[in-house]
Image: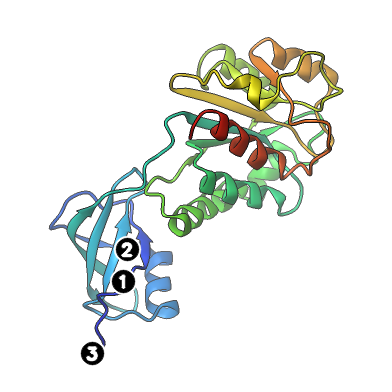
Amino acid sequence: MPDNRGVTARFHAPDAARIGDTIRLPPDEALHLRRVLRLEAGAHVRIFNGRGSEFDGVVVDIAKSSVHVRLDGVRDAVAEPRVSVTLAQAVLKGDKMDDVIRDAVMMGVAAIQPLVSARSEMTLAALVRGRRRERWERIAVASAKQCGRATVPAILEPQTFEDIVAALTQMRLPSPGIMFVEPSAAVGALTPAELADAPRQATTLVVGPEGGWAPDEIARGAATCRLATLGPRTLRADAVPIVAIAALFAVWGE
């Protein structure tokens, strides 16, 4: 049997909690271990539970319908950002939202709140019918697995823009938020450099759809958010949240 001690494959197992426990991998992870990586019993792997903990493990047994791993030690997890960022992102068309979820998880967001705005091309009902939230949850797990995070950000239930404003007002989302607008959309919108006074613990970044925000949405958002812009150039809708996160983390020393 080959020596698998050099294998550093990571697997997500929400049940992982204590050294010495033997856990069963979720079906998708077990399939990946068995059919894609073709690991065998005795292989050394890494297990993260999605809540910030990571373990060294050894594959105990592999069956047709299950894989069991024994947790042998605790690993130091990758540190999470000091400022907890919730990304409230207007749902984008096609697969663009998938890319935003993947990259936002990689960048270190704490949660993602999909929203439907006046100019969104998707409705809440269509998102439910398409089981998009479940798809985004799988993408979040895969992205955390790939980038080394031990925390999987929550994908919250999609809401309307009005619901998001109410949640910010009632502090059910981290407030005050930062709402990104086009440079011409609001007088006095701040640049990332002007937002260097980082929130102490948490904030919400609110980002619009391909068609931008409606004027009344900007007016309502301004009541609970600081309006911000990324400069004079027009960016793709799926690029805005990632550029915004990177710029803010840079000025916040993340």
| Residue 91 point in image, percent of width and height | 70, 40
Which residue appears farthest toward the left when viewing the image? 20
| Residue 25 image label | 2
Relative image position of residue 205 (x, y in whole percent):
61, 28
Q: Is residue 177 above or below residue 89?
A: above
Q: Which residue is mark 3?
A: 1
Q: Is residue 43 left or right of residue 98?
A: left
Which residue ends up furthest to the bottom in the rendered image?
A: 1
| Residue 211 left/right relative to 106 | right
Q: What x and y, as percent, mark residue 110? A: 47, 36
Res 133 label: none
How far is the residue under mark 2 from the one under mark 1? 7 Å
Q: Earlier in the sequence, mark 3 or mark 2?
A: 3
The residue that appears at 82% across and 14% down in the rendered structure is: 187
Q: Earlier in the sequence, mark 2 or mark 1?
A: 2
Give the structural element (helix, strand or loop) at label 3: loop
Residue nearest the viewer, comparing 209 with 235:
235
Characterize the local packing of mark 3: few (<14), some (14-19) or many (20 or more) Cα atoms within 10 angstroms.
few
Crowding at dot 2, Cα within 10 Å, few <14 / some 14-19 / many 20+, comes out as many
Residue density around tag 1, few if under 14, some if 14–19, many if 20 or more, within 10 Å: some
Q: Is residue 119 left or right of residue 178?
A: right
Residue in the picture at 41% in, 77% down: 37
Reading the chain from its start, which is encountered first: label 1 or label 3? 3
Q: Are marks 2 and 1 in contact (CB under 8 Å)?
A: yes
Q: In the rendered view, would you say 189 is above or below 94?
A: above
Q: CA distance from mark 3 to mark 2?
A: 22 Å
> Label 1 belongs to which residue?
66
Q: Is residue 114 visible?
A: no
Q: Quadrant of the N terminus?
A: bottom left
Mark 1 to mark 3: distance in Å?
A: 21 Å
Under mark 2, the amino acid is: Leu
